[in-house]
Image: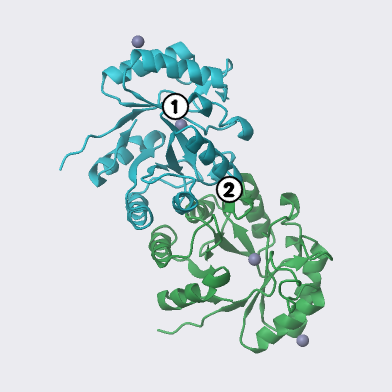
Chain colours: A cyan, B green
């Protein structure tokens, strides 16, 4: 029983700056080139955040479009996934680049505390992003930062705002959100099976939890993400 | 092995209005009298919300003080617990009545979606309320509306902002927050045992989930709340 494992590369998140991490790709051409290297090393899905000139997280549709076009040109067949999350991005602008029709886009299905405030995804906003993704035929990666978001995703399917089978990612280890505990991941999987039995899944640990969560994910049969 | 079960009465939540529920006690004298009836019927803890003249949830310290004094007078020995939650209350005002030194006060340890928006309890706000409760020697009832809040409570103990043993209440069945599922309650209890082994607990189901959650709670050894 072997099925191919999808290896995701997320070159640039929302938080690090080049002063902390000099090799961080923050311009579109750096991001395209680093994604290309990961593609040649076997990554099959690129999770895209873009940055403003001051390196803060950006929602600029043009930047997303440039990175998308570069990856399509240099990395044939690679799945392009836009992030609709990211701290410090204005809520109304977070879905503005979906008209570029990436293959996938992230969709957090609820709100939770993050280290310095609330990661705000109120119900109407979630429904709105889900509708946009349906309209542009974009497959959501459902981002689960806390337990309730799992059932909220199942409710989106019931409301006709999300197509089954869904793909979910459990994100663990962000302070104030769901911690990185194997007991939690195992429970999430048993609940996933109960409420969205045909869903595919992956899990990501943040910072020092990246490797242990990858290990649990492989052991428990999920896809892996860097 | 018998230990007394605490029966909590919450006469008035944040949502119902007298137009939906004509018997709802919304004035302080109605609340005192209804609490007194519940006290005579065996309730030992009163969870207090107060209302503005238009019946919207209030943070007015004076109203809380009047209900507290009335209960102390009519219901000797009853535990008085103030709600710091409640939808539509201004964040800065939610702890303003703690100087009345109720026996207990509710403390939600994170943020989550509710039916019409985010129930906002950002990290600094949680720490601030916890500090006030320490200062006035008020025992918090930790309100858990989603999984991460459980670990956030354990972190408050580690930071010295919450005294062990903690008392937690799992709240289930609010749309967009943690649903009422026995599998979840059982998981919460095993995690509670792992991260706050000496904590006491109760669980509350909202609306039509009230009775099933009470039943699970009794079966699983918790305290019951109306
Ligand atoms: Zn290249
Ligand atoms: Zn991301
Ligand atoms: Zn009386
Ligand atoms: Zn309450």
User: The numbered mark 2 sits on a residue in which chain?
Assistant: A
Residue B122's place in the image compared with B11, above or below, is above
Q: Secondary structure at mark 2?
A: helix
> Residue B91: horizontal and vertical position, in percent?
71, 50
- Viewer-side residue, B183 vs B168: B183
In this rendering, would B95 be left or right of A80?
Answer: right
In three-dimensional space, the C-alpha distance between marks 2 and 1, rounded to whole angstroms, equals: 23 Å
Residue B18's place in the image compared with A200, above or below, is below
Which one is in front in this view, the residue at disc 2 or the one at disc 1?
A: 1
In this rendering, would A74 be left or right of B207?
Answer: left
Judge the density around disc 2: few (<14), some (14-19), many (≥20) Cα neighbours within 10 Å.
many
Q: What is the quadrant of residue B19 in the picture? A: bottom right
Q: Image quadrant for the N terminus of chain B? A: bottom left
Q: Which residue is mark 1?
A: A102
Q: Residue furthest left?
A: A1
Q: Residue furthest bottom?
A: B40
Q: Image quadrant for the C terminus of chain B? A: bottom right
> Residue B18: horizontal and vertical position, in percent?
76, 72
Q: Secondary structure at mark 1?
A: loop
Q: Which residue is mark 2?
A: A123
Residue A119 circle label: none
In this rendering, would A178 be left or right of A128?
Answer: left
> Residue B210: horizontal and vertical position, in percent?
54, 73
């Amino acid at each position: 029983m072997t099925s191919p494992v999808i290896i995701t590369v997320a070159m640039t998140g929302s938080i690090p700056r080049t002063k902390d991490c000099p090799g961080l790709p923050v311009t579109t051409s750096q991001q395209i080139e680093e994604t290309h290297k990961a593609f040649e090393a076997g990554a099959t899905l690129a999770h895209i955040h873009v940055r403003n000139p001051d390196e803060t997280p950006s929602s600029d549709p043009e930047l997303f479009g440039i990175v998308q076009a570069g990856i399509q040109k240099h990395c044939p067949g690679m799945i392009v996934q836009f992030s609709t999350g990211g701290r410090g991005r204005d809520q109304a602008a977070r879905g503005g680049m979906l008209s570029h029709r990436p293959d996938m886009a992230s969709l957090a299905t609820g709100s939770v505390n993050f280290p310095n405030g609330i990661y705000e995804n109120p119900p109407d906003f979630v429904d709105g992003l889900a509708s946009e993704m349906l309209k542009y035929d974009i497959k959501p990666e459902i981002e689960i930062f806390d337990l309730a978001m799992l059932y909220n995703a199942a409710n989106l399917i019931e409301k006709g705002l999300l197509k089954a089978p869904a793909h979910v990612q459990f994100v663990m280890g962000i302070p104030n959100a769901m911690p990185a505990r194997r007991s939690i991941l195992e429970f999430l999987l048993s609940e996933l099976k109960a409420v969205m039995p045909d869903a595919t899944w992956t899990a990501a640990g943040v910072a020092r939890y990246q490797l242990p969560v990858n290990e649990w994910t492989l052991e428990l049969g999920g896809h892996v993400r860097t």
